[in-house]
Image (cartoon, grey):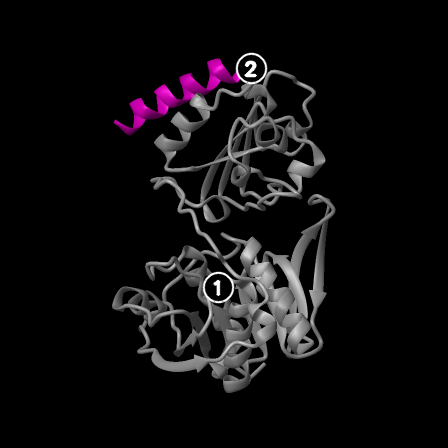
Amino acid sequence: MTSPVLVLLDHAADGVLRPSAAELVTLARPLAGDGGVLGAWVGDRPGPDALAVLAAHGVAAVHVVRPDADPALSAVTAEAVTAVLGATGAGLVLIPSTFEGKEVAAHLAASTGAGVVTDADGVQLQDGVPVASKTVLAGTWTTRCSVVGAPAVVTVKANAVPAEPVAAPTEPAVVEHELTVSPAARRVELVERTERAPSDRPDLSGAQVVVVGGRGTEGDFGPIEELADLLGAAVGATRVATDEGWIAKEAQIGQTGVTVTPRLYIGAGVSGAVHHRGGMQAAGTIVAVNSDPDAPIFEIADFGVVGDLFTVLPQATAELRRLLG
């Protein structure tokens, strides 16, 4: 592939890049070849800190699109990406595999006829054709999906590729676009936004370490949160825990929740039902704590502890705190 690769640069409202941006740029570099890696930034112009990160990871140009509608709406973001595609001729678009990212990919497919692969954990070129790898059926199969049409759109899981800077930083050109959004994209209107309470914990979908509680917590996430805070980890939960109201719905991991691919997953009181495993089975290292020795989670765990989480987790937390000084 000699055409550029376009990366949708996910960023917070204050302009801070999310970790997925550097990861996707790293993945895009060997795919772009001489075409270069281009960034699509929807919203106000990025600040110097964001541009410095993109330069360190080899971005050739950042296309800043300012739509005349709320960029928090996926249809608006999709039209912004479509505009950049038309201006650059990029043949491959990489998007973070978040809820919002997958909605953007769906809109792109509908408007451009693009072929889409979601929840990929890698992308390679074979004879110039993008081939994405992904696990399916609750992680029991690994598949490879080629996209023979253009553009190809692939949403990529967090932590699938470690972010690696280039030896010589680039000086990304900033190309600005004004966009008049179509009436179709305005059919949905954002009428209210409620900010979450600030937290020092990382975002669940992109966290390197995740500590998860299930039915075995019986509603007490204290030991889960204490261990997570010590490790700088995100806190997740099974569907049972969120359905019971023990923790917010946003923490649910599984086929109907968030898909996570952390370096380290610690599940406490998690049975390992198939719908939960589908959202975490690709984790690098899986540690399970459960009082039931026959719990399905032990079938995929790298390390397992049969015991009461209210005994095991506080002991582990105390020992880690001692070792960390």
Where residue 171 appears, as percent x and y from the top left, is: 31, 78
Taking 276 as reference, is 136 above or below it? Answer: below
Image-quadrant location for residue 110: bottom right
Along the line of sight, the residue nearer the viewer: 133 or 274:
274
- Earlier in the chain: of badge 1 and badge 2, it is 1
Where residue 263 appears, as percent x and y from the top left, is: 49, 43
What residue do we see at 34% from left, 41% from top? Answer: 198
Q: Is residue 274 left or right of residue 303?
A: right
The segment highlighted magenta reads 308-325
Examine the rendering and report whether any part of residue 122 can be seen: no
- The crowding category of the residue bearing disc 1, from other C-alpha atoms within 10 Å (few below 14, some 14 to 19, many at least 20), is many
Task: Report the residue marked by disc 2.
Answer: 307
- SS at circle 2: loop
Task: Report the residue marked by disc 1.
Answer: 24
Residue 274 painted magenta: no
What residue do we see at 41% from left, 17% from top? Answer: 315
